Image (cartoon, grey):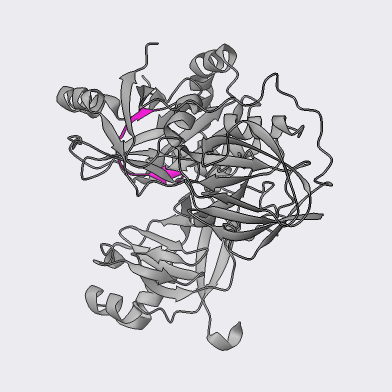
Amino acid sequence: MFEFLEVISPGCGVSFQDAGRPGWKRFGVPPGGWMDPGAAALANALIGNPAGAVVIELALQGARFRVLSDGWLSMAGASMGWMPGTVRKVSRGEELSFMRHESGVYAYLAAPGGWAAPEYLGSAAVSARSGLGSGLSAGEVISGRTDPTLRGPERVARAGQPAVHPPTTEACVWPGPQWIEFSAAARSAFFATEWRVSARSDRMGLRLDGASIEVPAGTTLSEPVLVGTVQITGGGQPVVTMRDGPTVGGYPKMGWLDEDACCRVAQVPPGGTLRFKPFNQ
Amino acid sequence: MRDWTFQSYGPHAWLVRFGRDLSEETMRRALAVARELEERRPEAVREFTMGYGSVLLECADDGEAAARWGQRVLPGLIEAWSSLELETVVTRSVEIPVIYDGEDLGEVARRTGLGVEEVIKCHSGRDYRVWMLGFAPGFPYLGVLDEVLHLPRRASPRARIAAGSVAIAGAQTGIYPSESAGGWHILGRTVRRMFDPERAEPFLLRPGDSVRFVPVELDDV
């Protein structure tokens, strides 16, 4: 264990993440794990880590760290004042500050060899709502598993690729289990609306504002839910179930986003907009 | 004719629903499928999740092969599994000691017109089935509760319910595995831990298990 960073402030949230813990949903445990697997993989690849190495996930902005020892760090995903898709040499005593939100929501900071983090049910992915670990707090010291000055060979062809976040994200939607129960008017309103991401969105769900979708009459018994499911709440607002979201739910399920679409919508910041279009099978 | 529904849920997952009611028969069939998935899960099925009378099966995201297997092979398996007898399906039965001193015990007694002792007798007097686990890791939804104890959820949910609380709502009873918010009526508490990530078997209960609550005095535990 090599002490590397001290958390000065977690800002909007900093937590250890990895690929998550599939295989426990029948016990009520969500899969969890990085909200943007592609960005996390890039952060690991840039610094020569195996694809599944533990990274830290920073949400939105405000995180600050003190560097406790010289070494390398890579970052990918959202842009918060450090060019995503780059590796940087940091020095003992330096302060890293991610105060400036430029684009995206989730950024990944990787250290050589991965971060040393406690595991729960076979994964270091923190899922605070489920009681599986908790986010990092001010004063916590975090360590790398190997000497931070020794980085592996970079495994990507070209670094310095900033994440591209278009002004309005478009996502394809597959029909969900209750798709056919929604009225034609409700379905067309769903696709016609430019949805705005609510500030109440988090690792459990992406909440959307912009219109009120008419929900089918009758109640849905609690049914299993896939990550990426678009549920319509009683008030007619869509919620996209994210990685820490509940494994069962009773709202009617309009549609489903595949993993790629799910990652892209996860990176739309509060106030940002997105549109859905039907998946062409 | 097939009297259950089989819906695709994206290209690699299928939702099987045996009914929209909470009848014994609907639950039995869903739990029979769960039991087979627990004991003899086909390699193609990566994950399954229980709902009320429904089961979600997720296959590995490996393109065409999984999609074809799900469409062609899975329905036959579901048909066979769901017709198994419940007796051959449920083998585990678990006793949960409960100290009946919950903060809503008095109110439940008043609203149901039963005495406190009768509420305890009624709640602990039958075997329950684990219908599913959800809400929080290890939270069991158990049924079916004696009709005299059916009450809607509390009008205002509590912000903090202690881990181990044994509670009722509607036709169900459950156990809060960890401290959380919640709107169920608390009858008592147990020292048995529903979920402990450090244990070899982290979860005390599985879908389909039979559960009985055993009243104990504080001095016994």
Apparent side of residue A225 relative to residue B194 in the rendered image (left or right):
left
Apparent side of residue A177 relative to residue B112 in the rendered image (left or right):
right
Eyeballing the image, is B214 above or below B117?
Answer: above
Q: Position of residue B88 (x, y in %)?
A: 57, 42
- Furthest residue toward left: A185
Is residue B37 something that shows in the picture? yes
Q: Position of residue A3 (x, y in %)?
A: 77, 57
Closer to us: B192 or A267: A267
Determine which quarter of the picture holds residue B146: bottom left
Q: Residue at x 36, y 42 (%)?
A: A270
Q: Residue at x 27, y 43 (%)?
A: A233
Q: How many marks?
A: 0
Position of the N terminus of chain A, as image quadrant, is bottom right
Magenta includes A208?
Answer: no
Magenta includes A248?
Answer: yes
Eyeballing the image, is B104 above or below A161?
Answer: below
Closer to us: A198 or A150: A150
Is residue B195 something that shows in the picture? no
Closer to us: A73 or B107: A73
Q: Residue at x 55, y 43 (%)?
A: A32
Q: Position of residue A181 (x, y in %)?
A: 23, 28
Apparent side of residue A39 relative to residue A213 in the rendered image (left or right):
right
Eyeballing the image, is A95 above or below A190?
Answer: below
Q: Residue at x 69, y 43 (%)?
A: A54
Q: Which residues are magenta?
A: A246-256
- Furthest residue toward bottom: B219
